[in-house]
Amino acid sequence: MSYLQRFKTLFQRAFPRKQKDSASDIENSRMEQHGRSEPAASLSQPRLQVEPYSRLELDPSDSLNLFRHLVGITSDASMANSGSMFSSGGRPAPNLGIYARVVHNEQDAKVGYKYFSWLINGCLGLQIVVAATLTALGAAGGSRAAVTVFGAVNTVFAGILTFLKGSGLPNRLKYYQGEWKRVREYIEQRERDFGRPNCDDDPHRVAEIVESMYAEVKMDLEASTPDRFAGHNSTQKSQAVSTPIYRYPSLPLPIGGGLAEKGKESETGFGSKMKNIASEITHYAKEAREVAKDLQARKDGITEGASKEVKEYVDEAERRENMFKDKITGISAEIGQRAQMAEQVAVNEEVREQGAIDIAIREARAHLERLETAARSMVPGPITIEASYSGTISAAQEERKMGEDY
């Protein structure tokens, strides 16, 4: 594939063309809305032979397979391309389903974002090189032809970048890649929900929510595409096609037929809008319930964490209080023990002092007895010695006093 064809493919992906309905398709859709299955002009034409297709039989109680069929995850063989598409009654295009289209659009947006990012970054790099070369040629006095050529190339790059950035590329493709991814992940998650035992969700209601999400992304994509005409009724058409409408059979009235048809159109549009609003309300209510569950879970987690921290703080305070009480008790016991030891030391000192006094008295009396014995042996007359003890005196002082008495 040449570079021109690649660029053409990328341009078509970035700016898709709006498919116009042919006059016959518009007429057939109008006839179908008015309750008539065939146009009046086709009454005179021979009826075409339509190829018979087998009817797909689904179990109404099997919610998973029913949901897969509704959103296009699985498709029957009758919804693929017919082998005789050019014959009468052949199927010209397959019925891919919403899921296949969402995946295809997501891949296209992803590839387009990558290629346009490369293109813009390459143009920026080349513009820097061209601008630097142009500055060097102007400063060096280069030829006017070279300066003109580089200036024109720089202008071309600037125009390309302005056009691409003005179109919102490549971030617009990144945004729609995220939008298609959101729809795809919602479908896949609902498929897993239906795979759970005893799932009470209604597959038809969930399929309507998927269709509304798909129509919302398509309308956003059409509205944000620049340089593109979008009719006033495009939004209403998308909403009308997004949900299936059951039409009751009616008989044509001979008088006031136009008024009855207008009333049917208004009733159909109002019913479609109400169904879309109901599906959106259901979708947002489910999201609100999920958000409420998330908030409740966060609240419970915060409450549990706070209670755990408070319990740890109380336990730490009790532990420190017990430790302080143990220290106070130990200090009191130590003080009492030391007081007993001091009292015992005082008693021991007192006993030791009293023993020393008794020893001194005994020694003094023994010395007096020796002196008295010596004096009697030396002096013939009677000797009277008075000894009195007024306090604690040493043996030397007692001998000195006895010498003075003699």
Image (cartoon, rainbow, N blue to C red):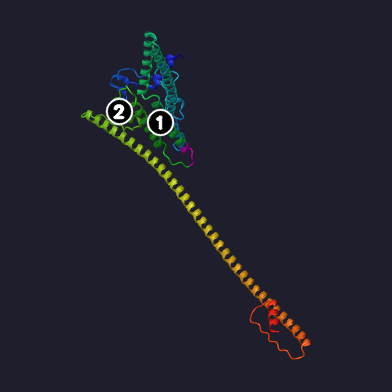
The structure residue drawn at horizontal position 72% and vertical position 79%, both measured from the top left corner, is 363
Q: Give the percent coordinates (x, y) of residue 278.
A: 34, 38
| Number of numbered discs on residues | 2
Measure how far apart labels 2 and 1 are at the Cα level.
32 Å
Which residue, given by chain and number where applicable, does mark 2 sit on? Answer: 33
Task: Give the quarter of the figure containing the C terminus.
Answer: bottom right
Amino acid bearing label 1: Glu
Which residue carries the number 1 mark? 179
Mark 1 surroundings within 10 Å by alpha-carbon count, few (fewer than 14), some (14 through 19), many (20 or more) = many
Q: Which residue is outermost to the left?
A: 255
Left or right relative to 65: residue 244:
left
The residue depicted at 69 percent of the width and 82 percent of the height is: 404
311 lies left or right of 207: right
Of callouts 2 and 1, the N-terminal one: 2
Q: Is residue 246 left or right of residue 104?
A: left
Q: Amino acid at mark 2?
A: Gln
Q: x%, y% of residue 251?
A: 27, 30
Other residues around mark 2 within 10 Å, as few (<14) / some (14–19) / many (≥20): some
Residue segment shown in magenta: 192-197
